[in-house]
Image: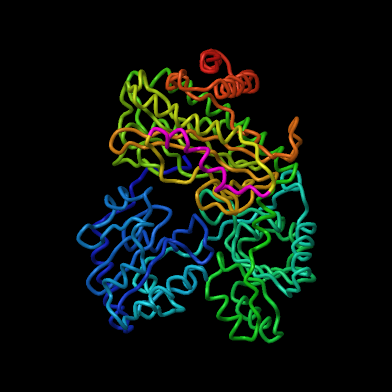
Amino acid sequence: MLQSFDDTSDPSLGPPRVAALRRLLVARGLAGYIVPRADEYQGEYVPAGSERLAWLTGFTGSAGTAAVLAEKAALFVDGRYTVQAREQTDPSTFDIAQVPAARLSAWIAANAGRDARIGYDTRLFTLTTVEALAKALTEAGIVLSPLDDNLVDAIWPDRPAPPQGQVTPHPLEFAGVTSAEKLADVQAVLAKAGEDALLLTRPDSIAWLLNIRGADVPRTPFALSFAVVPAIGKLDWFIDPRKLGEAAREAVAGAAEMREPGQLEARLEALGRAQAKVRLDPGNASPWFADRLIAAGAVIKREADPCQLAKAKKNPVELAGARAAHARDAVALCQLLAWLAREAPGGGLDEIAVAQKLETLRAGTGRLKDLSFDTISAAGPHAALPHYRVNRSSNIRIEPDSVFLVDSGGQYQDGTTDVTRTVAVGTAPEEACRRFTLVLKGMIAVSLARFPKGTRGCDLDPLARRALWAAGLDFDHGTGHGIGSYLSVHEGPQGISKAAAAELEPGMMVSDEPGFYKAGSYGIRIENLLVVTEATEVPGGERPMMGFETLTLAPIDRNMIVADLLAPEERGWLNAYHARVRAEIGPHLSGADRAWLEAATAPI
């Protein structure tokens, strides 16, 4: 199995490790140290040797930051992880603080005292983050002290070695555009801006630009590396040569010169000596890069990484691949949902059994490369935890007459999928069904949206919440995130949330996943992936309007829908969607699975 259900967290290990860190703080003349989840590449997934936060605290979530002072320590997480953080850390060692209500800078200011020196690894934070934190701490009379080494590494005796996953070409039949064409487009951006070079610190940007994929971290197929793109000529790619076979070298030879990672600092110094104007994305790159460029004489141009926006706007080949991947994935998901409908009401299934069954069905397509994230298989109260990850100690039985949530996805060479379905096991509680229907109304509202050029994700976010708000309810996560093409399942700059400021453009893929969570009882989330369509004329209108094409194809549980709460337009969307699922997926199912689909997609 690709997914492991072992519980690797041990809260008892935290106290002695924090004590060792505190001894090192004294030796270095520091009052405290900050440990983020991030590595130097700022990705969602990090290799084993960069899981410093998990090693120190026991917390294994995908986002968080710890602050360790001489007498106190705190772990800062968002609302997705507060329960998990309390379960995985030692309560006598770490306070659990929930962001954004709790702020790291405010906690340090309140507990460290004036003139305290707080250390941090300059490679593990973005420029934007460091500047904001330094400003807040300076105002409190505290010094944020940059370090070029890592204090956790110094006390981690058996830290895993860096990964050496093999790089593979991403063929043109899936990429749609050659790396030479992409490089020319990026260099045209530099030329227009009068910039001499671009520093790429995001491995997903490099994977997209060079049409390669890697195997250095779980769930996201990129190679950990950096690159310098000059305004003219081949880019310099700083990557461990052991990751590159002959096919990979040949695939990138026209666009890149391969360099040893140890040569990166000399390349930055050379840019400085030439007084080059270097584009650096402050939201992605760390101070480590900026410090070296500036010290050597370069001029920093703080602008967005142009690969991120270009990568987000999928070309026709990538969109065709996404449709094929979602259709393939839907067959496996429908088989899973049919099996659940038959087996779960008897009470014989548990959370791990469902996750394993779904992975087996996806693998049965013969095209699965990896999961796009660990499957969220959540029964009853666990479904109220938006990012719950089942392990052998947390695994529970799926009870009859309850609510079950499964959020999952696959990595295929032609596309990345992410889909959530919430289903009734037997007869779900009436309250849960009414709130499920309110969530569905929000999901449909986004699916049906028409909007002009310039619309941002934050402009559409209220559509997903309106029905919930009217009932005095809400959810505390974003409505949707961007999705890569056989890359990151969470991709920017696009999204749908209160903070999503990027304009939506044709070809961008986003998730549409409103929810509702009743702590200790049940959780609801319904998620489809959408792609932004080209603007078209509206009959009788004056402006062309964009909209969404739905990629995900799987029934939405009719047993949880209170039909009287649906407006005619919403009922029409649902029936048309189910008719499409039945027409496109039905021919790939047989027997009991086909019969289940016919019933599950019957008109309401």
Residue 533 horizontal/vertical position (percent): 70, 39
Depicted 28 relative to depicted 484: above or below: below
Q: Quadrant of residue 159?
A: bottom left
Depicted 361 relative to depicted 496: above or below: above
Residue 457 horizontal/vertical position (percent): 57, 47
The residue lying furthest to the left in this view is 92
Q: Is 350 inside the magenta-drawn segment?
A: no
Front residue (pair 453, 283): 453
Residue 258 horizontal/vertical position (percent): 69, 68
| Residue drawn at 41 percent across, 80 percent down | 145
| Residue drawn at 65 percent across, 43 percent down | 413
Depicted 155 relative to depicted 26: above or below: above
Q: Quadrant of residue 367?
A: top right
Q: Is residue 359 left or right of residue 233?
A: left
Depicted 438 relative to depicted 31: above or below: above
| Residue drawn at 41 percent across, 41 percent down | 475
Q: Is residue 206 left or right of residue 217?
A: right
Q: Is 463 inside the magenta-drawn segment?
A: yes
| Residue drawn at 49 percent across, 34 percent down | 420
Front residue (pair 484, 602): 602
Residue 113 horizontal/vertical position (percent): 27, 78
Q: Is residue 253 left or right of residue 389?
A: right
Q: How is the image coloured?
A: rainbow
Give the magenta range. 454-471
Q: Quadrant of residue 250?
A: bottom right
The answer to whether any part of residue 296 appears in the image is yes
The answer to whether any part of residue 352 appears in the image is no
Q: Is residue 532 left or right of residue 332?
A: right
